[in-house]
Image (spheres, helix red, strand yellow):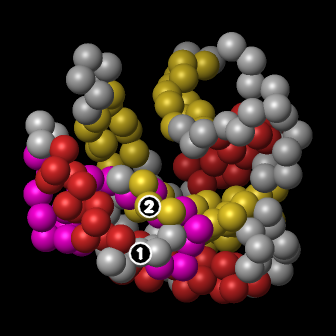
Amino acid sequence: MSLIGKELNNFSLQAFHENKFKTVTKEDLLGKWNEDVTVAGVLGNDYEGNKILEEYENIGISTKYIEKVDDIETDTSYIIANTSNGTRTILTTNTNRKTHPYSLDITDNFDCLVFDGEEYETAIKVIENNPNAISILDAGNLREGSKALAPLVTYLVCSHDYAEEFTNMTMDYNDINSIIKIYEEMRKTYKNHLII
């Protein structure tokens, strides 16, 4: 299979490298392919935060918009995937996460923006400063940041959990009409490209 000249879909997977598991994403590959990739966010000034920065810098991803702070711990998550049915279990080590407002001013212009609902006030400013950029929200759960960003992005990619909570309806995977009803209900609010 060749990826030359093709758009690479978002993905996240675990790879075993140098006797440990490492998360590999689209950004990792694009960084290795010398695409200009910049990551913004907040990390704790701790071992995990430093390892994340080191990994990004090693593959050529710009970290100039990553803010390191002393008063939070960097989240660590372990994902256990069941390959036989596609389910996953996520174990997070820092469940009492203290949030820290993002304070860096992002002034660059971008062609594509990908958000997860965190630091959404900053994300809104970045969208406003890049009106011609394609913007994507990966909305796993219906929370304040996801709700604020969802109507502003070009593509809303949401989980069934988000869709069910937003519509207060339940999907029956054996009944396509239940999925269509949820989709149609969401389209009343979201006029952008919607993927559930």
Would residue 54 be seen by someone viewing this image from the given angle? no
Which residue is at a point 85% across and 74% down the rendered structure image? 108
Disc 2 crowd rating (10 Å Cα; few below 14, some 14-19, many 20+) is some
Q: Which residues are magenta?
A: 151-172
Marks 2 and 1: in contact by CB < 8 Å?
A: yes
Would residue 91 be seen by someone viewing this image from the given angle? yes
In the picture shown, does residue 49 fall above or below 137? above
Secondary structure of residue under mark 1: loop
Secondary structure of residue under mark 2: strand
In the image, taking residue 40 as reference, residue 179 lies left or right, namely left
The residue singled out by tag 1 in the image is: 190
- Residue 167 colored in magenta in the image: yes
| Quadrant housing residue 15 | top right
Disc 2 residue type?
Leu
In the image, taking residue 124 as reference, residue 166 lies left or right, namely left
Residue furthest to the right: 34
Q: Where residue 134 sits in the image (x, y, percent)?
A: 69, 64
In the image, taking residue 57 as reference, residue 8 lies left or right, namely left
Disc 1 residue type?
Tyr
The residue singled out by tag 2 in the image is: 194
Q: Where residue 126 sits in the image (x, y, percent)?
A: 69, 79
How far apart are the two marked residues, 1 and 2, measured between alpha carbons? Answer: 7 Å
Camera-nearest residue between 195 and 81:
195
- Residue 46 colored in magenta in the image: no
In the picture shown, does residue 98 fall above or below 137? below
Which residue is at a point 52% across and 37% down the rendered structure image? 12
Which residue is at a point 14% across and 53% down the rendered structure image? 178
Please tell me the numbered disc located at residue 167: none
Quadrant location of the N terminus in the rendered image: top right
In the picture shown, does residue 45 fall above or below 122? above
